[in-house]
Image (cartoon, coloured by chain):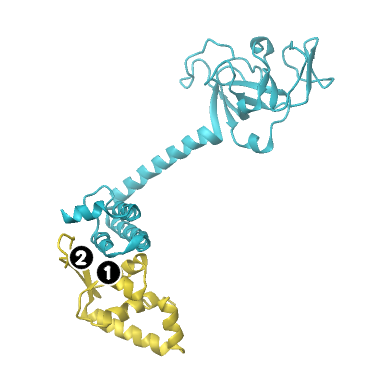
Amino acid sequence: MTASREVASEHVVRRLARFALTVAVRGRRANGGPWGEAILAEFAQTCGQWEAIRWAFGGIRAALQERRAAHRELPRRVRIRRRAIRFVLTAGLAAFVLQQWVLTFSYQPSPAMAPTLQTSDYFLSDRIGFRLIGLDRGDIVVYQPSDDPGGTAIRRVIGLPGDRIDCRAGLVVRNGAEVGEPYLPADCIPTIVPDGSVYLLADNRAMANQTDPVVDADQVQGRMVARLWNGGPESWLAPPARSDTR
Amino acid sequence: MPRIPHTSPQTLLLFSALLVDPSRWRYGYDLSRETGLASGTLYPILMRLSQQKLLDADWQPSDEPGRPPRHTYRLTADGAALARQRLAAAAADAPAPATRLAFGAR
């Protein structure tokens, strides 16, 4: 009774220090090793917050050392299994972080970027590099269209801020010069690309020019770095065909 | 040349604290206060000494009611002999024992 009341009236810093030390000593078990328990029992002797923190900090180091020593005593089979589990979990987490924020593996469901990217192609896009070194004309980017929140589309950068974009006889004209790109015919409204925006067109212009080509630069999520392989309609990797032609 | 075990300044500090009264059982917290060693330094040394049968460790009920039992330590006969030998060797080695002690106690 006395002990529990004392614990309840303990300063929050001391309670946190005790908690951290208890976790390091016991983990999920009811009792830790004898040395960890010894350090935990001595915690009550410390006075004040700083001594408690210092005791807990050193105690955590000692308890971890004790646990490592106990781990070395385990049978080889158990150690290998634990290491394998840890490896799989770490690799899974690393793959998730990579896919989500660094280098994304994606699928192209539509012919909008044909002939550069065919329907069912898999490609890699970089999600950090373009933010550091900027976009260039001719880059292929993945962006989030305003009319499709949550969706993504893939386009080529035609114009950067300040560029004057026009179309003449099916060819794109940038700042008065024809953009020598042997893609399908383009048709567009003359535009000067505003600050903080990019001018995007699909390579397969007949298929995918219904959207507004002027896109806020913040909507760009990644830049394609490599086309990998074609999944094909019969490939087991290919997700079900989508009806939109983005 | 391999390092001679139990010669670090921290271990020597602990030896001198334990040799004050070798028959008395000592608490970890009190040893930490006396030697100035942090728990993260003190306990690994205690673990090593105990594993090599140089130190006895035992659980004793706390003097204060309602508190959990406390772990106590004292040198074994072998441990006490080794501690005396190491402290004597360190004193003989050090050209200026006063500075060495001052450094170790910090």
Q: Which residue is mark 1?
A: B28
Chain ID for yellow: B
Quadrant where the C terminus of chain A is found in the figure: top right
**Can residue A135 be seen in the rendering of this structure?**
yes
Asked if residue A41 lies left or right of residue A130, the reply is left
Q: Secondary structure at mark 2?
A: strand
Asked if residue A167 lies left or right of residue A87, the reply is right
Mark 2 and mark 1 residues within 8 Å of each other at the beta carbon: yes
Asked if marks 2 and 1 fall on the same chain, the answer is yes
Depth check: give the residue in front, A66 or B32: B32
Name the kind of residue labelled 1 in the image.
Answer: Gly
Q: Position of residue B39 (x, y in %)?
A: 34, 66
Name the kind of residue labelled 2 in the image.
Answer: Arg
Q: Position of residue B62 (x, y in %)?
A: 17, 66
> Neighbour class for label 1 at 10 Å: few (<14), some, many (≥20)?
many
Ranked by sequence position, the earlier of labels 2 and 1 is 1
Query: In the picture, residue B60 is in which quadrant?
Result: bottom left
Q: Secondary structure at mark 1?
A: helix
Q: Which residue is mark 2?
A: B70
Subunit that carries the residue with mark 2: B
Q: Position of residue B56 (x, y in %)?
A: 21, 73
Above or below, A19 against A233 in this view is below
Asked if residue A110 lies left or right of residue B59, the reply is right
Depth check: give the residue in front, A52 or A172: A52
Q: Colour of chain A?
A: cyan
Depth check: give the residue in front, B104 or A104: B104
Which mark, by number, is residue A88? none
How far apart marks 2 and 1 lie (CA) works out to 9 Å
